[in-house]
Every structure is written in structure tokens, then in C-alpha cells.
Image: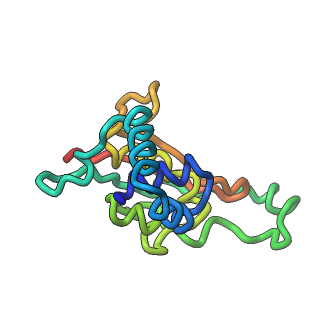
Amino acid sequence: MNFELWLFTIKRLGTTMDVAMTIFNSMSSDMQKKLRDEYDREYGNCSNINNDKGSKPKVRITVLKKECFPALQKEYLSNSKSGVCPLFEEGQVFIADMDSYSRCMDGKFCADAWDALNKYIYAGLLGGSFKKGCKNNKVMLACCNDGTRPVIFKLEILDK
């Protein structure tokens, strides 16, 4: 089963990847075909994504800025002087491809930040584009969901 079909199965069945793979692999070939057909109807045939003949899109993730809101930290955190995020440095760059995406950047990325960004990264890796309204639909800004010390990232789709 390819990675994109795993993700679709997870979404369709509301389960984790391991459980989705187990469920998918235990399905009859007719049920697997129905799921593949439903995937193709909703998302189109993405066979070009796993085509090893050509290069695939990548997404560059750059840490633009780290913010800190001391008043909010004082009011809401047990450590009111926790400061900016200790996990990233401004200017730090990560390159995501389909392989590193499927492994959640091999633990090199904050899980909460990954949760906030991964849908945009995945769209870029599938050859899509970012939000309408951006000056360039291959570049966007996004941030993690830490309300007292957010990190702002620039995401760039690197063409094939």
C-alpha cells in the first residue's frame, strides 16, 4: 500500500496508520479496490507521486521568528519565565520530502508544531499549492499553536 493510500485509509476509517494498514491489509481485494476507487474519486489518481522516474516536490520549512508573550506566560504557565521556544532557532531550515514526512521528520521537529503544519506540507508534497490569497501560492507563513511562545515558519514548495 502506498503512503497516500494509507493516509486516505486513516482519514476514512478514523484510525492510526498501524491500525489502518492492518485493517486495509485484512480487507478483501474487492473492498481494497472500492477504497482505492473512492480515493481516486476524491483526490484523483496520484500515481505520479510514487513514480521513481522523476523527482518529487519537497517543502522547505524555515524558522522565521520566535515570539514570547511574558504576560500570558505569567498568567497561564506554571513556569512564568519559560521564555521563547527552546526547540527551534531563527533561520533553522528543514527539508521535507515524502519519506521524511511519513516519519514525522525523524523526531527532529516539535510534535505540536508538526501537527499545526503537516497539512500544508502534505499538500505541497502532493504537488498542490498553498492558500489562496498568498502572493505566491508556493510560499506561505504558518505558526505552531503554542499561545505563549509561538514559532513562525515559512513554508516553500520546491518544484520537482
Residue at the right extreme of this rendering: 75
- 30 on left or right of 112: left
Front one among 30 and 46: 30
- 146 on left or right of 98: right
Front one among 122 and 75: 122
Front one among 93 and 53: 53
Residue 71 screen position, x and y as percent: 81, 56
- 31 on left or right of 156: right
Quadrant of the rendered structure where residue 146 is?
A: bottom right
Residue 131 screen position, x and y as percent: 46, 32
Quadrant of the rendered structure where residue 100 is?
A: bottom left
- Count of all numbered marks drawn on residues in the image: 0
Residue occupying the point 30% across, 43% down: 46
Residue occupying the point 39% across, 54% down: 29
Q: Quadrant of the N terminus?
A: bottom left
Residue 154 visible in the current orientation: no
Residue occupying the point 42% across, 41% down: 39
In the displayed structure, 131 sits above or below 27; it is: above
Residue 149 visible in the current orientation: yes
Colouring style: rainbow
In the displayed structure, 49 sits above or below 24; it is: above
Front one among 39 and 68: 39
Residue 40 screen position, x and y as percent: 37, 37
Residue 85 screen position, x and y as percent: 61, 66
In the displayed structure, 155 sits above or below 87; it is: above
In the displayed structure, 143 sits above or below 40; it is: below
Residue at the left extreme of this rendering: 53
Residue occupying the point 72% across, 53% down: 147
